[in-house]
Image (cartoon, coloured by chain):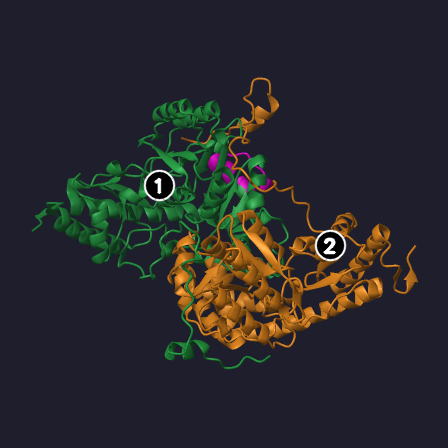
Chain colours: A green, B orange
Amino acid sequence: MLIPNNKHKETFMSSSASAAATFDYGPIFARDLPAPAARWGGFSKFHFVGGNNDSELVPLDELVAATNTVMKREGRNLATYNLLTGPHGYRPLRDFLVGKLKRDAGMECCADDILITSGSLQGLDLVNAVLTEKGDTVLIEEDCYEGSIKRLVRRGVTPIGIPLDHDGLRTDVLAKTLADLKARGVRPKYIYVIPTVQNPTATIMSEARRRELLKLSDEYGVPIFEDDCYADLIWDGQRPPALYAMSKTSNVVYIGSFSKSVAPALRVGYIVAPWEVMSRILAMKTDAGSGSLEQMVLAEFCPKHFYDHVPKLNRGLRKKCEALMEALAEQFGTAAEFEDPKGGIFLWVKLPDNVDTLKLYQAAVKAGVAINPGVEWSVNGPHAKSRLRICFASPSVAQIKDGVAVLADVCHKEFGVPERSANIAKR
Amino acid sequence: MLIPNNKHKETFMSSSASAAATFDYGPIFARDLPAPAARWGGFSKFHFVGGNNDSELVPLDELVAATNTVMKREGRNLATYNLLTGPHGYRPLRDFLVGKLKRDAGMECCADDILITSGSLQGLDLVNAVLTEKGDTVLIEEDCYEGSIKRLVRRGVTPIGIPLDHDGLRTDVLAKTLADLKARGVRPKYIYVIPTVQNPTATIMSEARRRELLKLSDEYGVPIFEDDCYADLIWDGQRPPALYAMSKTSNVVYIGSFSKSVAPALRVGYIVAPWEVMSRILAMKTDAGSGSLEQMVLAEFCPKHFYDHVPKLNRGLRKKCEALMEALAEQFGTAAEFEDPKGGIFLWVKLPDNVDTLKLYQAAVKAGVAINPGVEWSVNGPHAKSRLRICFASPSVAQIKDGVAVLADVCHKEFGVPERSANIAKR
């Protein structure tokens, strides 16, 4: 029964004549799989993509102290799946969230209305699994988080885009779309919105629009799926109540995250939903719980430090945001149009119509600059063609400055835009 | 934009006359959802179910020290999804696994053959997503982990059971089944086995059977899905090489876990697979990485302590196992048949044919004793009807003793079995 020091594979590799052929998985794979992943190539020198945050703003000392305290007190509970507090996740973290969601988003909920998930991405998957199936239709903001669009497309669900303006989702267009779909016998499964620091536009939906949206949801019997994962990142901390808070009929399923407010790699998010939906979601959460150490650490950290940490984080992010806006103004001048956002970690930038940001993305990557091309963050291709998303939280101010200069060079070479940078004509 | 101190929900609850009705999600839910979850009822007094471990055997001091060290050194990297080492997971943990899998299981693999997952359960989901679809057939051990069976049934995949004996999967029956299926034009998508401390029978598949299994896999073009999650828990540490190690054709996809060897609630598992399969799996892992703090802590803990910790853990588990076997012998006498296992955290017990363990389970739960009824851990109902799984790692020796006594009482009342306990005739 002892392990021989076997070198099967090496023997096989070097004696191909007598060895069996490599197993062919081709006929075994499920149909309609996405394209295989490429080998990971590392980060770009100027990495303006992904929800990564500022490493200098990770509240390290506080997290280390929280980890020590909670591990010494409750570390033995790691022997039990979900610690000892059931399938919703670590109770002290849910207790913190009950208070946080009331304070920040005006939500009235109890600990068992909350399910801790492995990031809000698992929240997206669980809600999709419970509410949608192949052939369904959902309504989303026209410019929208790429991961949400991709998930829907992979499930065979059709996302229909509703345009946005300064106040968020255009509820007048939504009303018309719902009426049109109803006339055609189509009942969308949900209306997905990121109402508070929308991704990628950074708009904050006005309270009036929220009321209108809730009314339309009830009128057409189409629930709202509210993704509030950026809501903590508002410079002045002022926000309207969550749709979940304003709902009078439990027509909202809500997800949130600690990825943006504390640390992305912790992978801790949450779903808040009425029991009718939560009981269905729990039946689909068959992963024996999300990571408990990270839940314990957050539960210990947050009551003491969350409300001090978040404004500090926002001040740091605001500086980066200003650096990006300045760099764009300097390098692109009026060729780059964007709004000064009220929060978040990204800018949604419009370049002149002749710029195809998918091509710009391909050329920029070769020059060491990673950006998100607009067409990947929108269901309206023509509208998004000359737009791009630039994330500013992770790179340093110097990288922002230098990276935007490289991007402007690449863009000039590819599209003749901008014509001038830093008031010097581009050759 | 300030949050009003709104009490929408309370107002609604208390003024039902004028309020809108509660939203009806009935028409929105996907079809064929599993039954909704019931409210969590807490743990049974005698909790002999679930893969929970002995809380006294969590290597707490070493985990606390590892956490401190790694957080102080690399905690700022939590600002970046997947830390800085790409979509396969934290590189130092994969480096440890390369050595561990070579040493313990005879496997030759490199860091990029490994993907860190959120427990081996996410591994099951990813492999199923890549290899199976509705209508497929797979082969499994007849008595098998409930979570694996349930996942397949939910996907609409038919699991066909192959019986086990002392040496593990009956490869003679497997050969016949593969031939029969081929004659009917059915190519199963994989052969799923837990060859090393099988769940629930605790058998260890012999090397000869492993060779035979690998040969049949190649012959029929049906890959092997090897679940090695209990392989660290062998009393004497002696085990045959993994099927993955013995394969000459890359016909094995392998999953493992730290849940059984370190702590279940950490939720850290891994997949080892050839690139043809791994590249497909990576394309389906859209969760922005598994929990990084837990990966960091394990990567720091394992090189220093894993090989000291595991034998200690096994000595503790062996004591619990002996306590359970003694309690069964004392309370059930010859009515309870089982084999003295070489490792693991559970016993697979056969009671007399007139005992229906599903009914026993229902009665026992009311008396505060939770067990796994055989039919939930098998695809052969008649074979499993009077069998049950009893997990011994989490309860104390006293709880094992007392819980088995209660179970014997309940069983006697329901089925007249055992007739005597501790040599005293039951009334």
Q: Residue at x 58, y 60 (%)?
A: B140
Furthest residue in direction top, as rendered: B18
Do we see residue B48 in this rendering?
A: no
User: Considering depth in this image, is B172 or A157 the residue closer to the camera?
Assistant: B172
How many labels were placed on the picture? 2
Q: Residue at x 20, y 49 (%)?
A: A360
Same-chain status of marks 2 and 1: no
Q: Which mark is residue B385?
A: 2
Do we see residue B210 in this rendering?
A: yes
Residue count near mark 1 (Cα–Cα under 10 Å), binned few <14, some 14–19, many ≥20:
many
User: Considering depth in this image, is A61 or B128 the residue closer to the camera?
Assistant: B128
Q: Is residue B314 in the magenta section? A: no
Q: Is residue A111 in the magenta section? A: yes
Residue denoted by label 1? A199
Residue A112 place in picture, x, y as percent:
60, 41
Q: Decide: marks 2, 1 in contact (CB < 8 A)?
A: no
Query: What kind of residue is marked 2?
Result: Lys
Query: What kind of residue is marked 1?
Result: Asn
Does residue B11 lie above or below B186 as drawn?
above
Residue count near mark 2 (Cα–Cα under 10 Å), binned few <14, some 14–19, many ≥20:
many
Quadrant including the N terminus of chain A = bottom right
Horizontal side of B260 relative to B364 (left or right) equals left
User: Considering depth in this image, is A19 or A410 the residue closer to the camera?
Assistant: A19
The magenta segment? A98-114
Indicate the quadrant where residue B171 lies: bottom right
User: Considering depth in this image, is A235 or B271 the residue closer to the camera?
Assistant: B271
Circle 1 marks a residue in which chain? A
Horizontal side of A194 relative to A218 (left or right) equals left
Task: Tell me the SS state at disc 2.
Answer: loop
Q: Which mark is residue B188?
A: none
Does residue A423 lie above or below A58 as drawn?
above
Horizontal side of A213 relative to B37 (left or right) equals left
